[in-house]
Image: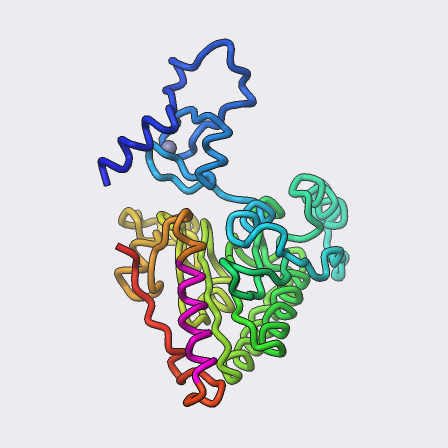
Amino acid sequence: MQRLFRNQERRFGFLPGRQRQPDVPDELWEKCAGCGEMIYLAEFEQNAHVCPKCDHHARLSARKRVQFLLDPDTFVERDSTMRSQDILNFERPERSYEQKLEDEAGKAGIPESVIYGTGTVRGEEVVLAVIDTNFFMATMGSVVGEKVTRAIELATETRTPLVIVAASAGARMEEGMFSLMQMAKTSAALTRLHEARVLYVSVLTDPTLAGVTASFATLADVIVAEPQATIGFTGPRLIEQITHAKLPAGTHSAEFMLERGMVDCIVPRNDLRRTLARLIGLYSSQTSDPSTDGMPPMNGGVQAKAPS
Ligand SMILES: [Zn+2]
């Protein structure tokens, strides 16, 4: 591993802030949130926004995620204009909920925090839904639940493996009970997907918390997590505020969850595409086996194993 990093060091040539070349414009550099090093943006991009120095996995927009996961030009998006409404006429202190939604859409470049559609991963057909933390910290409102449910239903109807890249800071407070109902709605849709024995792989990214963790993100056949992702129900800061007790370090990390069996494997972002293709390929080989009558065994025929 150390040798790998040394090789990357030569290839990527990141520089401590003090040593940056003064003639290179600031916009060509990205500061790593993990180690603080300045990384040349083009190389950071090429490395799927993973720091070559400390392996920190920076948060990705949904569009970038699709670009990194799917084969080029295969993504066909669905319901791309669906957006939330202020159903409760919720009173916010500064901006109205409507205005907040508009501002978030402008910032994130998408009208809600999830996009979904179909595409291929190394030639394997998938239904893919990706949640984007740039929009309202990926809080789960009614449109998030609806689009995730539609992705699940599409996978069920077409018997196509489903991949959901999850993230969320929690429920969308401005939608009250409508937000909480999305947990039951997505879970019910997944029950039908499981009954149809269609593969579902969940990818937990930083952070996956609250109602999303307690529903569709952890109801998968295989639960994959990105390294160091924060995963849990209540976030560590809130627990500490309420209990006035200091939590041990790392209680909400993907690595902690792997040790305790909540996730099946941790896969570095650069290996994710290959891992998904392998899982889907194993599933497809089961469904195409005539002895299984077009149906995989009840365990999905998939053995999840962390890549070495
Ligand atoms: Zn770093």
Q: Is residue 280 magenta?
A: yes
Residue depicted at x 69% and y 43%? 93
| Magenta: main secondary structure | helix
To which quarter of the image does residue 1 belong? top left
Q: Is residue 236 visible?
A: no
Q: Give residue 274's position: percent from left, percent from top.
A: 41, 56
Compared with residue 65, is residue 295 higher up or lower down, i.e. above or below? Answer: below
The image quadrant where one finds ligand 1 is top left
Compared with residue 106, is residue 201 higher up or lower down, i.e. above or below? Answer: below
Residue depicted at x 47% and y 36%? 46
Q: Give residue 275's position: percent from left, percent from top.
A: 40, 59
Which quadrant of the rendered structure holds the C terminus?
A: bottom left
Compared with residue 43, is residue 181 higher up or lower down, i.e. above or below? Answer: below
Total count of labels: 0
> According to the image, what is the colour scheme of the structure?
rainbow
The residue most toward the left is 2
Q: Is residue 32 magenta?
A: no
Residue numbers of the magenta segment: 275-289
Q: Nearer the viewer, residue 95 or 283?
A: 283
